[in-house]
Amino acid sequence: MKNTVSAILLISCQDQRGLVAEVSFFISTYNGNIISSDQHNDSSGAFFMRVEWDLEDFNIPREKIASAFDPLASKYNMDWSLKFSADKPKIAIMVSKYDHCLLEILHQKHSGELKGEIVLVIGNHEDTQPLAEYYGVDFKYLPITKASKKQVEEQQINLLKDLDIDLIILARYMQILSPEFVAQFPRKIINIHHSFLPAFIGAKPYHQAFERGVKIIGATSHYVTSNLDQGPIIHQDVIRVSHRDSVEDLAGKGRTLEKSVLQKAVKCHLDHRVLTFGNKTVVFD
Amino acid sequence: MKNTVSAILLISCQDQRGLVAEVSFFISTYNGNIISSDQHNDSSGAFFMRVEWDLEDFNIPREKIASAFDPLASKYNMDWSLKFSADKPKIAIMVSKYDHCLLEILHQKHSGELKGEIVLVIGNHEDTQPLAEYYGVDFKYLPITKASKKQVEEQQINLLKDLDIDLIILARYMQILSPEFVAQFPRKIINIHHSFLPAFIGAKPYHQAFERGVKIIGATSHYVTSNLDQGPIIHQDVIRVSHRDSVEDLAGKGRTLEKSVLQKAVKCHLDHRVLTFGNKTVVFD
Amino acid sequence: MKNTVSAILLISCQDQRGLVAEVSFFISTYNGNIISSDQHNDSSGAFFMRVEWDLEDFNIPREKIASAFDPLASKYNMDWSLKFSADKPKIAIMVSKYDHCLLEILHQKHSGELKGEIVLVIGNHEDTQPLAEYYGVDFKYLPITKASKKQVEEQQINLLKDLDIDLIILARYMQILSPEFVAQFPRKIINIHHSFLPAFIGAKPYHQAFERGVKIIGATSHYVTSNLDQGPIIHQDVIRVSHRDSVEDLAGKGRTLEKSVLQKAVKCHLDHRVLTFGNKTVVFD
Amino acid sequence: MKNTVSAILLISCQDQRGLVAEVSFFISTYNGNIISSDQHNDSSGAFFMRVEWDLEDFNIPREKIASAFDPLASKYNMDWSLKFSADKPKIAIMVSKYDHCLLEILHQKHSGELKGEIVLVIGNHEDTQPLAEYYGVDFKYLPITKASKKQVEEQQINLLKDLDIDLIILARYMQILSPEFVAQFPRKIINIHHSFLPAFIGAKPYHQAFERGVKIIGATSHYVTSNLDQGPIIHQDVIRVSHRDSVEDLAGKGRTLEKSVLQKAVKCHLDHRVLTFGNKTVVFD
């Protein structure tokens, strides 16, 4: 993992002969050195590719790469995007009372593990304000009642749009986002669900896990879609539990999982390693 | 884990003061040395205990221990059973075409990892007959059609009853047992389900996991009850998967899980380490 | 796990008939209700027990329990200690520049996951002072040079003794404690080592792991003894790595491990679940 | 993972601009469709690539692909090899008394999980002969004494050479191979070591693990070099243990690990997913 300025192409399209060759050739023609290249051919005939190359001696200026690549993209009817390692995506975090996931993200950003810039924390409770401020991040307190929900969501949307937010992290945000909210930020909202999805969807998964007597619990990070808990899964992890664990013990063990699973998913997203198709993801990690 | 002749008491009842003391005292009074003692107090007020003691210098002959213990059991209204490490439970395995779980159980028995005696393999296909015979176990071929199912189940029940079977292992047996069959062998049938229950209950869990795009798959071993895939879970384990895994890859990875999870659950059961209550288990491992 | 005021006895001695019975009987005689009881018989003939009981209706006042138990302890020549769930052990944390383990401990304490009271952070660098202060914990900056080390250790010892510290956590403290220091706090210092001990003892374990090309890295939390990296292991965990991981990637993945392993070990210690014998531990979790 | 006839190129060389492009272009020029392509750039400047393509419409006949590729290989000074998915590598297994790893390999081969053909089992004990024969594989009994070792190794080498063996699997073979033997089969011998290397090298690793009181044990599969237990690691896995586990328990848990780790390593090797450099591996799985 060299620490240079690089470009990253994320491509998905129908699989066709010559795809890897032509993309690689485009890069080498203009004197780019490929740092890493991953591809995946789905059984349905879909093709996914992530290729990253060093821009140091690349002959096309950064702002013209997209238009130079466009003819090739059109030829193969690609769904594609171009990213730069030097970009700093703007991140907002939405949070309620639990602070462990928020803290993990703030700390990992502070430690240099996560790219981008955390520009805002939105809380529907005030509890985490001191933490956000300790890390020098603006905190916006927007309490929500059943009556005010629709109106507050509009405020949230405006705030996020005004700040040109690239990624919204739901760090144990205990409100369900409306389809209207979700529609504003497609593949830009990452949630952490405190169960091993699809087991125990919905509310109180630790209670459900306790009732069912499972021997392993999990956490799942996924993109948010309008179908609750049904979005494309980015990362999951699990931990062993036993009859000795009360619901509170499950929740305690779960918190350690939740924060590491969310952090890993966010890192993969920010490193441009996640492609989605339908309800699934390809994660080139 | 000393390798002596020992007795094992499995107790469940309402928690009450003095339970551990009186049970321990019963054992030491008659000069028994406790090898291991586990207890669990459920949040509902239920009490579970497993205590194992060395019979070498124990003053009560084996066949009279139960009646000696009975007054204490009655006093506390215990649900209890007495086992001996020297007992050899009689085991039957039911199987269809897949042989990996059958092989694991036969091999682990052969290697001395599992107690008891495997006295019969019942297959609704003939495929695994040579394997059973290689390990010196009788194989009974009982094919099943929709029309014959009820009648074949009666044959199976008679066979299992005649042999005085203590444990029935469903080693990827692809037929659903009728409630009538299950009712004959309460807490005596262990199944391996090829998913991380309660996710992906029912048929074709690997297909379901593939469709949902999960990043981890699992296997679950549980006691069979009349509710399909809902019985008390004994053991579970998981393995990481990715977009690169086809349904066949998931099945391949899953097979390795299935056999080890089933084997572990069977071992716990045969070592008298599993107590059930309602739909859950206490596993003292 | 009921949330009551309870007493905990930790016992180790030579295994003898009647031990469990007499200890249980002592408790029930005075009307104590056993909440949990664990025992272990080592193959060498050693006996370990942890028993916890509810003090609510216990007939001996807390301060007289030890003397009431003493005759039984003497009879069996026990090595024992008596703890109370309501006790608040005083904790000090020693730290250098890395803040992830410190943060985890401070956060988990703040969230109610860890018992006790963190009364002091000692840093040989100033970097973590704001973090300690954010959580309201005194920070003492004691820089160390080769020349000053002996003298600074004396300062540290005095500080820790004056505050009557019960547990010292080395949260990636990058100085090696002298045998003289360690001798002052037997079984009271918990360290996190950033490798899967005994692999990669000593300095720069991530570099060593990278050079060796291992596919899994780990972290180990152990009591500190005068033998570097040789103390009794309390907890370990691992994470999968690959050729794609640079030394920096290993260190990043490792940090997530380190903090969770240290936290788990500290929690077990504070819950009085760890007994040591020679260079090993019995952890009743 | 399509199930077609494909070719696989394994390449390692100094990293240079255009490598991926030229290799991809070579394939697409002759109408090959790339099924999967993986590359890795080591921090030292080394480049590794595995590319697999469908031969269905490929314009170069199989036997001429190597010579067609040779100029490109020479230009970049590649260390390379060409494999075909339809090839059936010839496999020999060496074994002593333990049969669990042998059984796993025979069974997985039988189930279609492993490519190739197992043509011979060599045992220095006779114990596993019936098992080999059950799976229809020749068994050669070659007992070894200190005095006869050199001479028996010559017999073994002749046998393996005569059969044109591509891969030798040491399935808990308890003899140390001489450097002379190893030199005959570079990167063609895969061993399973029953510890989490580099911890507990040498003999009796479970005893060592028990003595040290570790909380996790492991198994390691690696290529055999003349340095005992020091060869490039292909795969590792671990399992949690506790104070309750005796040395025998560790060995029992370890056996389950050993066989799955060995099987996974052998599968990666047979699927041509492993490249080595110095003492490390790149595993494109």
Image (tube, coloured by chain):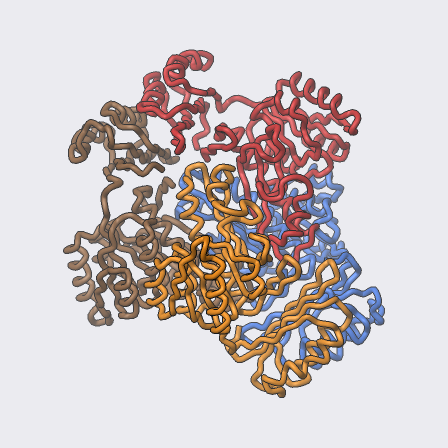
Chain colours: A orange, B red, C brown, D blue
Along the line of sight, which residue is nearer the eye, C270 or C134? C134
- The residue sitting at 48% across, 48% down in the picture is A239
Q: Position of residue D200 (x, y in %)?
A: 46, 52
Q: Position of residue B122 (x, y in %)?
A: 71, 27
- The residue sitting at 31% across, 30% down in the picture is C34
Along the line of sight, which residue is nearer the eye, D223 or B205? B205
- The residue sitting at 36% across, 41% down in the picture is C282
Q: Quadrant of residue D243?
A: top left
Q: Is residue C274 visible?
A: yes
Left/right placement of residue A168 relative to residue D274 reads left
Q: Quadrant of residue B241?
A: bottom right
Q: Quadrant of the N terminus of chain C?
A: top left
Left/right placement of residue D174 relative to residue C282 reads right
Q: Position of residue A159 (x, y in %)?
A: 46, 69
Left/right placement of residue B51 relative to residue B125 reads left
Residue reaching furthest front?
A: A147
Task: Identify whether B225 is placed above or below A99.
Answer: above
Along the line of sight, which residue is nearer the eye, D173 or A274? A274
- The residue sitting at 68% across, 77% down in the picture is A24
Along the line of sight, which residue is nearer the eye, A281 or A172? A172
Q: Position of residue C66 (x, y in %)?
A: 18, 34
Left/right placement of residue B15 relative to residue A8 reads left
